[in-house]
Image (cartoon, helix red, strand yellow):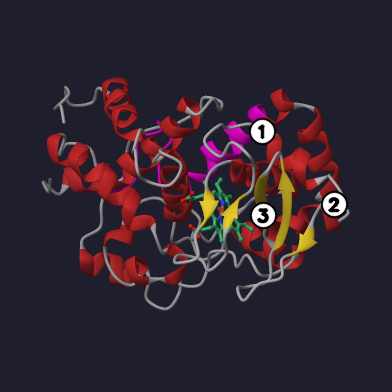
């Protein structure tokens, strides 16, 4: 891994692109799991309690590292470790979110607004942050529309943003040994597109008969695809469905809305002053801590 000049985030994006290709891992790309890492790092934020979110990179320590909701994300963290080791000036929390946005764009998706400024917790801070409050905040794929709305409203997202964010399931797959669910949502799961919405609207989905958790399946162009109950909730719910239809018909609109919503997601929990400078980093600089 190359060390790049401190603060040169464009050069760091190039370093991230170099590790996206992972022959022998899943569909040959670390991209989807980078996107899930950025999302899970951010998605335990609570607007009401004002904790959780992408600051801290708490997933390196218990309890987040052993939370079953985060199963498999150690792959993403390990792919990024050499980059962080060669460039210790970037926090893990910044690197994880930068990797998510870089991956989306490299897989054909939109550019996402991203700013540096997250700091890393140590293990005690991570435990403190998560003491009883931040656990269990990520969505459960086995549930329905009211659960999805509740989880994302807690983060501060509207119905429109919830549907836009869900379009990330055009990437990657479910793994039996991680979530228990199985398979990809679309035929080409390393290409960011509005395919997920187009497929959701097709009347092809049937309950899968198997010994795993309840999920839907369909065969498209010879490939077995899947949908989670929470994915199907987007077409079952009368407020979510119009957005699925809009994004299925208009990929540009989806890209625009996704970019804004994902940019907002990775800012959750990052406390910036009115000049946009992250307060936590500023505080540690004032206290003379690294
Ligand atoms: C994968 C659930 C929202 C991005 C998964 C998996 C589940 C899941 C069960 C499979 C994990 C595995 O077995 O490896 C959900 C639920 C959501 C949700 C219930 C909301 C109701 C999101 C959002 C994003 C996202 C908002 C990003 C914006 C991804 C990606 C993968 C994934 C990229 C593939 C990871 C890989 O291939 O390793 N999700 N998710 N998901 N999710 Fe979600």
**What range is drawn magenta here?**
255-281
Mark 1 Cβ inside 8 Å of ligand 1: no
**Location of residue 95 with respect to 40 vertically, above or below:** above
Q: Which mark is residue 92?
A: none
| Residue identified by numbered label 1 | 257
54 on left or right of 188: left
**Residue 251 at what x, y percent from top left?**
72, 27
Lower position in the chain sequence, tag 2 or tag 1? 2
Q: Is residue 167 above or below residue 173?
A: above
Instruction: Identify the image quadrant of the C terminus.
Output: top left
Q: As drawn, is 190 to the left or to the right of 85?
A: right
Disc 3 crowd rating (10 Å Cα; few below 14, some 14-19, many 20+) is: many
Q: Report which quarter residue 61 is drawn in.
A: bottom left
Which of discs 2 and 3 lies nearer the camera? The answer is 3
Pointer 3: what residue?
226
For marks 2 and 3 on the same chain, the one whose residue lies earlier in the sequence: 3
Query: Could you say which quadrant of the image residue 278 lies in?
Result: top left
Quarter of the figure that contains the N terminus: top left
Per the rendering, the mark at residue 239 is 2
- Asked if residue 269 shows in the view, the reply is no
Residue at mark 2 to residue at mark 1: CA–CA distance: 17 Å
Task: Work out how far the residue at label 2 is from the one at label 3, CA to CA, in angstroms.
Answer: 23 Å
């Amino acid at each position: 891994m190359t060390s790049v000049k401190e603060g040169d985030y464009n050069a760091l994006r190039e370093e991230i692109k170099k590790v996206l290709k992972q022959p022998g891992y899943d569909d040959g790309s670390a991209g989807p799991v980078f996107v899930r890492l950025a999302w899970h790092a951010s998605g335990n934020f609570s607007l009401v309690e004002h904790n959780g979110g992408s600051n801290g990179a708490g997933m390196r320590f218990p309890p987040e590292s052993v939370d079953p909701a985060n199963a498999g994300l150690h792959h993403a963290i390990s792919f990024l470790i050499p980059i962080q080791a060669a460039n210790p000036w970037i926090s893990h929390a910044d690197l994880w979110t930068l990797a998510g946005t870089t991956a989306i764009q490299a897989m054909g998706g939109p550019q996402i607004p991203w700013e540096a400024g997250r700091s890393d917790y140590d293990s005690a801070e991570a435990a403190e942050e998560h003491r009883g409050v931040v656990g269990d905040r990520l969505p459960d794929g086995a549930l329905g529309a009211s659960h999805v709305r509740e989880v994302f409203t807690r983060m501060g997202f509207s119905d429109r943003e919830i549907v836009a964010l869900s379009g990330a399931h055009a990437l990657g797959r479910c793994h039996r040994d991680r979530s228990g669910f199985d398979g990809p949502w679309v035929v080409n799961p390393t290409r960011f597109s509005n395919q997920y919405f187009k497929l959701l609207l097709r009347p092809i989905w049937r309950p899968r008969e198997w010994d795993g958790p309840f999920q839907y399946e369909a065969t498209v162009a010879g490939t077995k695809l899947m949908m989670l109950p929470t994915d199907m909730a987007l077409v079952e719910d009368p407020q979510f469905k119009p957005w699925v239809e809009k994004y299925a018909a208009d990929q540009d609109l989806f890209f625009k809305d996704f970019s804004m919503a994902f940019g907002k997601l990775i800012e959750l929990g990052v406390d910036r002053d009115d000049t946009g400078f992250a307060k936590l980093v500023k505080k540690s600089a004032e206290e003379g801590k690294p």
